[in-house]
Image (cartoon, rainbow, N blue to C red):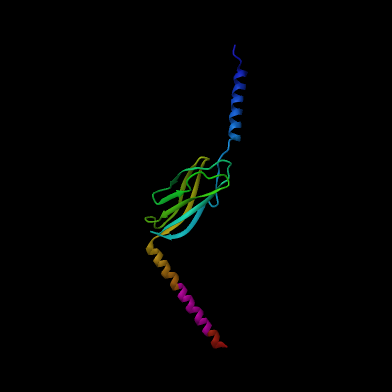
Amino acid sequence: MFDKRLIFFGMLFFAATSWAQQVTEPRANLKFDVDTADFGTVAEGDSFVYEFWFTNIGDADLIIKQAWPACGCTHPSYTKGPIKPGERGFIRVAFHSKGFGGHDLIKEVIIINNGDERYARFKVKVVNMEFKKDLETYKKSQNDSSSLKKEKLHRRKRKNK
């Protein structure tokens, strides 16, 4: 007759040794300075570049294997080669807003490395060029009328003296 306790203790021993290997194995760990950047409002057709800086806070070399963009409008590049524990690297993201006028966007770049998977995100509100021109004209007219009002008020104060 076969003893079931022997199987149980064998499985327990196997699980304990596997867990011990995972705990003691050195591991890379990427920590961003800022993992979500807010670019505010940009005009449709504008492009910009942002660098997400990070530190390897693990105890093994960090190697970025891939940076996947959210779509064709986002082009990532990154630090190549091993990044030692405590050293810094970056993910550079170029975004082209053509075709996104009138939208609030949240875009991601997925960073796949030898430690795990991380996300660098950015938020942006893209406005149509016509809207941007109208907004600038409106702001200018508000500033001009505000300056005129201040000047008239200043003249009245001088008259009353």
Report the side of 52 relative to 44 (left or right). Answer: right
Q: Is residue 148 magenta?
A: yes
| Residue 90 belongs to magenta span | no
Above or below: residue 16 compared with residue 103: above
Is the residue 44 above or below the residue 22 in the image? below
The answer, for residue 35, to whether it is visible in the render is: no
Question: Which residue does the image show at 51% across and 79% down from the upper left?
Answer: 150
| Residue 155 point in image, percent of width and height | 52, 84
Residue 43 seen by the camera: yes
Residue 81 place in picture, x, y as percent? 49, 44
For the N terminus, give its image quadrant.
top right
Q: Quadrant of residue 161?
A: bottom right
Q: Which residue is situated farthest in the top direction here?
A: 1
Q: How many marks?
A: 0
State the residue in front, 70 or 160.
70
Residue 152 image position (x, y, % from top left): 50, 82
> Residue 141, image x and y in percent?
43, 73
The relative height of residue 38 versus residue 153 in the rendered view (above or below) is above
Front in this rendered view, residue 27 or 81: 81
Which contiguous range is marked in magenta?
142-155
Residue at image coords 37%, 64%: 130
At 59% across and 23% down in the image, what residue appears? Answer: 11
Most common secondary structure along the magenta stretch: helix
